Amino acid sequence: MRKLALPQPNRASMHPIGLIILIFIVLDAIIGLVADILNLRSMKTRLPEAFQGWYAPGKYAQAQLYLRTNTRFSWMVGVFNLLILLMFWFGGGFAWMDRWVRAMDLHAIFSGILYIGILLALKALLAFPFNIYGTFVIEERFGFNQTTWRTYLQDRIKGLMLAVVLGVPLLTAILAFFQYAGDNAWWYCWMAVTAYMLIVQFVAPTWIMPLFNRFDPLPEGELRQAIVDYARRIDFKLNDIFVMDGSKRSSKSNAFFTGFGRNRRIVLFDTLIDRHSVDELLAVLAHEMGHYREKHIIKSLGIGIVQSGVMFYILSVFISYAGLFEAFYVEDVSIYAGLVFFGMLYAPLDSLMGLVLLAMSRRHEYAADRFAVQTSGKGEAMIAALKKLSVHNLSNLQPHPLYVSLNYSHPPVLKRIEAIEKLVSSPDTPAKL
């Protein structure tokens, strides 16, 4: 095992890198708290004009209660996670685990898999009670949960198996490259992760997703014929349309596009079909096709690949930097601990890049709306679909701009409706989005 002894750390003082990481963790928590508070205060008791007549009595108040409940629950989870992290960090947990793993005298790569695996397992175990409460108490209280205990536990077991089957080989490759490839390690890792991302895009629709849900071809009928006719009109090669049994877990509705080539799939939740007209469903699917035609999926994947390359290059600089290990009171340099500690150091840059990606995603949603309206002529139907989805899913109609910037991959629904209305009133002029 690659080993470099460090000076015995003094816990009475903190290494500057540790201080930087701690400041960001606290700052991130404060910014998130401020955004949450502003988001709660931005709620208005008066229903927006665009949604007048769409809510049953008491439904809008229920949506606001749902937001408050989830926000307060997220505060409880966040405080718990922060306290556990700080206690583990300053209590010498990372160092204790490192010594325990080293005492087993395993090969460096096996030691790395064990060290990181234990940390991930502990994190999952700590999150487990909160996940249960969120699903079986909060979602149940507001009428969304359809998950049985059997399904819930099966999902967790399958997720664990996938993490082992897909994650362990990738982690092994990364550890091996940094252990043996020297200066070339970072771009070997970049190539491996890029290949992994591309392979998952191809296999997920046909091999991974069916492990959790059933996907049935949309049966013949008015809806299928309308979609086929629309796809032919815009010259969109349609392999098939699938209906997913989303009601198996939640009464919430959605639709999505996934995969590439022959493995690409357009998927409608069964709950979506149950609540919307043919025109509304066609508008929703036109939006998903718009993402494909505007190359949003490829653009996002390309940015993700570039982002991973930047991360691995910076990782190659810091992975064996002694100060990083001193910050966590670990006495010996190792590749596996370097990966863990770098993840915390890299978090500020990752968050900044995340803000850019979220902003890009919101622009993509506007563009997909524009494509759908201008090619299907179903602008009014799309507005109706967005309103129905927002009402049923108890969406926050008036989120605060800061909260949107930090968390929303889609624009607020009122903004989307406003942009679509502009397109409907002047279909030949692109709306300013």
Image (spheres, rainbow, N blue to C red):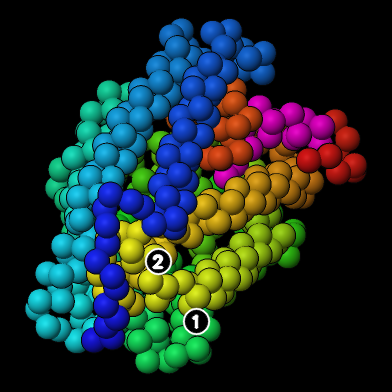
* Residue annotated with mark 1: 186
- Residue at the image position 40 percent from the left and 27 percent from the top: 71
Q: Secondary structure at mark 2?
A: helix
Q: Tell whether 49 sits left or right of 244.
A: right
Q: CA distance from mark 1 to mark 2?
A: 20 Å
Q: Secondary structure at mark 1?
A: helix
Q: Nearer the viewer, mark 1 or mark 2?
A: 2
**Which circle marks residue 81 in the picture?**
none
Q: Secondary structure of the magenta portion, mostly?
A: helix
**Which circle marks residue 323 in the picture?**
2
**How many residues crowd around disc 2 within 10 Å: few (fewer than 14), some, or many (20 or more)?**
some
Front residue of 22 and 293? 22
Q: Looking at the picture, how far across and down is residue 279, in whole percent? A: 63, 39
Front residue of 254 and 308? 308
- Residue at the image position 32 percent from the left and 56 percent from the top: 213
Q: Is residue 413 magenta?
A: yes
**Split into 4 quadrants, where in the image is the N terminus?**
bottom left
Q: Is residue 255 magenta?
A: no
The magenta-colored residue range is 408-424
- Residue at the image position 40 percent from the left and 87 percent from the top: 177
